[in-house]
Image (cartoon, coloured by chain):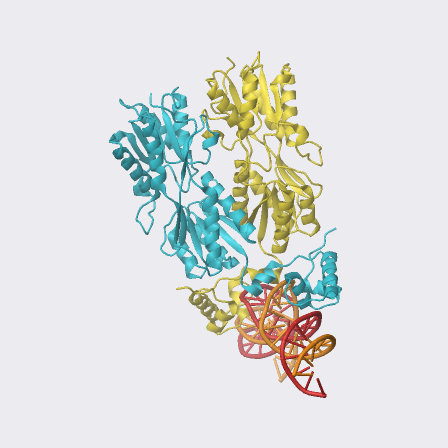
Chain colours: A cyan, B yellow, C orange, D red
DNA sequence: ATCTGCTATGTCAACGATGACACACCTGTC
DNA sequence: GACAGGTGTGTCATCGTTGACATAGCAGAT
């Protein structure tokens, strides 16, 4: 039996009271007699009443909805973890989440921003933006914006991870296992967007940590062991292909590395595939470390990696949004720590 | 500079016309003089006007929003692919998507259903439901519901895949490579929910295809080679652990299989990990086939698997929802085909 | 001169919830 | 008997958009 949800007025009529009284009962505020309360609750149950949050949103100018702007949820499992955490935090606080994948296209992202504004979402979380200008548009129209995992704009607050410390832990781990020839496979800092405040990209931080880590232990990376590329192409499917190519090249060198640090788990999958194909054992012949801890636990061997705190990123992102919505004080930036998860892909240098 | 979006009335005043005229210009319908149109468009631009879809939704009783109920987007990458496809189809049609993860809990799902109703979403897609009763609640309140990948209710329409044909292709492939001892690692049909129309679960179909496929080639599976379990635990993180355990047991048998068919890529990751740990080469020593084609391409070796048409599942799901919303005729069920993707984890029997 | 039909624009009542405001009743106090 | 203060309830404008309906000018036909 199809029955549309009743309105407040219908409930009121059935209970023989005014809409204000029904409202008071449902909101549990103000004075209500027991008698009226009973009749209202009975009427609510009988009519199958459900509040109309559309009407409420119009009246209160508050939709209890946040927008979640994603690069593309299929591009990196990191986004999946963050999206899940954001959603969980939002639901717990009585908010709903609308998602939009821009697929790396600024104009598509712009369209998403326009629908978020038209919808009157209370705030928007970016993970990550295709174009900082779009974030500004949002802020200019009075909607709080938070960036997760990046910090590319002047105006939006952000939650991110300390990539330098994270990458450094990976290098230190490999060095402590006796590795001296450690290769770096990552994105080219020249082609990735920079943090406005610090003028450094995520790739800058990870590469710097690698160089500093090596130097701190008196090691000098061979130039051929530093492989930079575009593993992470915003408008394409992410894949491990580039990891395979770099590894093929690395292992063909006169002096191949005994360990490879790939700055993304997806990139590391390509490394493992290449090594598998050439019959190298991991970690007996070569050790491998990844970054993110997304699919690391599903690989053979289980991948040692620098874990991003996906749940905390999402939760803090939402908490910042909520604080901004409620006009509470909000820090401009939260920097979280990564943790090194040691699994089976790293072992003593041969 | 923070400026709230203007209202129709403000635009109308600035342009020196009525709200009806502004509305006509924006909707591009009815008669408007060039002069009025110019003034309205200028005023729209000047005031930074954005339609308020909350008010529109209240007035038209149509929110252009659909709900997407997920088990948990982190549980299986299959859901990620479907969610992405649903979102893309929705955006292309001018709809927005609100997500909710129930995490396997019927009561949590119920709460999500209530918020979907309160929000007056135009339709809800399930992938997959925790409790068919919740789907019924939705249908009873007049909101179209579509099930993706399952078909557990009487009332909701569904899009799914032919699991029998898909699994059969995997078995045929292995047999054609000369394998005669093929193990089956999957979920126990006894503990998974059944399709109401056919009284068969996804697991039933896949297991039946395995048995039939073996029999069709004159092969009789050894009972110890059929491993059924609960790999897919709704309220837990999915993991390959069960795949590892089954594989450890299988390879310890006096007559171990030369091929293993795991009915989920995630399960297959455990199979590959177990084989890797015991030093078996894939596919030289043992061939492995998965199901879903979610992370198959990222594994070492790249996994041969039965691909679910995730994009088509999502798109058809949305299309069915849209047809139902618009009152067009909608088929009760759409059954799509899988495709066998042959990669590097299968080879001739040793 | 009247009528028809097209063009162009304005008016206004919904949609459903909210909450400020007003009103009325009651009990107890001085 | 007047008044304060607590208790209980109803009225109604408002949020922004929509679209049915009304109105009116004007060209061309009769």
Outermost residue to the top: B254
Q: Is any part of residue A111 visible from this angle?
A: no
Judge whether A293 appears above or below A21 on screen.
Answer: above
Q: Is residue B147 left or right of residue A248?
A: right
Q: Is any part of residue A337 visible from this angle?
A: yes
Task: Please name whichever residue, B344 or A122, is drawn nearer the observer in this view of the structure.
Answer: A122
Q: Residue at x 66, y 57 (%)?
A: A50
Q: Is residue B290 left or right of residue A345?
A: right
Judge whether D6 appears above or below B215 on screen.
Answer: below
Q: Where does the image place residue A85, in percent across and percent down from the top left?
A: 50, 45
Task: Please name whichever residue, A298 or A249, is drawn nearer the observer in this view of the structure.
Answer: A298
Q: Where does the image place residue B247, in percent across and percent down from the top left?
A: 54, 21
Task: Please name whichever residue, A310 or B25, is drawn nearer the observer in this view of the structure.
Answer: A310
> For residue B309, what is the image quadrant?
top right
Q: Residue at x 68, y 34 (%)?
A: B194
Q: Residue at x 70, y 68 (%)?
A: A18
Q: Where does the image place residue B298, in percent across and percent down from the top left?
A: 45, 30
Q: Where does the image place residue B182, in percent across and percent down from the top left?
A: 58, 18
Judge whether B312 appears above or below B177 on screen.
Answer: below
- Report the quarter where the N terminus of chain B lies: bottom left
């Amino acid at each position: 039996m199809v029955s549309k949800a009743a309105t407040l007025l219908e409930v009121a009529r059935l209970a023989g009271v005014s809409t204000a009284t029904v409202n008071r009962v449902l909101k549990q505020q103000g004075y209500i007699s027991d008698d009226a309360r009973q009749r209202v609750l009975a009427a609510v149950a009988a009519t199958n009443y459900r509040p109309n949050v559309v009407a409420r949103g119009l009246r209160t100018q508050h939709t209890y909805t946040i927008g979640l702007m994603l690069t593309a949820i299929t591009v990196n499992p990191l986004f999946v973890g963050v999206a899940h955490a954001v959603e969980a935090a939002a639901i717990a606080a009585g908010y709903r989440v609308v998602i939009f994948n821009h697929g790396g296209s600024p104009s598509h992202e712009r369209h998403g921003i326009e629908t978020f504004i038209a919808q009157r979402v209370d705030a928007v979380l970016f993970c990550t933006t295709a174009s900082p200008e779009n974030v500004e548009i949002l802020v200019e129209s009075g909607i709080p914006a938070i960036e997760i995992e990046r910090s590319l704009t002047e105006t939006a607050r952000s939650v991110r991870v300390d990539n330098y410390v994270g990458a450094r832990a990976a290098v230190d781990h490999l060095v402590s296992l006796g590795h001296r020839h450690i290769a770096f496979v990552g994105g080219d800092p020249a082609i990735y967007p920079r943090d406005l405040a610090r003028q450094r990209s995520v790739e800058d931080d990870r590469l710097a940590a690698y160089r500093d880590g090596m130097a701190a232990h008196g090691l000098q990376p061979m130039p051929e062991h530093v492989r930079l590329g575009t593993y992470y192409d915003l408008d394409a499917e992410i894949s491990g292909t580039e990891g395979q190519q770099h590894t093929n090249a690395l292992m063909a060198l006169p002096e191949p590395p005994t360990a490879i640090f790939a700055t993304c788990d997806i990139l590391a999958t390509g490394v493992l595939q290449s090594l598998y194909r050439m019959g190298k054992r991991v970690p007996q012949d070569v050790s491998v470390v990844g970054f993110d801890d997304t699919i690391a636990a599903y690989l053979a061997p289980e991948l040692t990696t620098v874990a991003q705190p996906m749940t905390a990123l999402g939760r803090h992102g939402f908490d910042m949004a909520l604080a901004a919505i409620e006009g509470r004080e909000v820090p401009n930036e939260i920097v979280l720590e990564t943790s090194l998860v040691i699994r089976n892909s790293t072992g003593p240098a041969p």
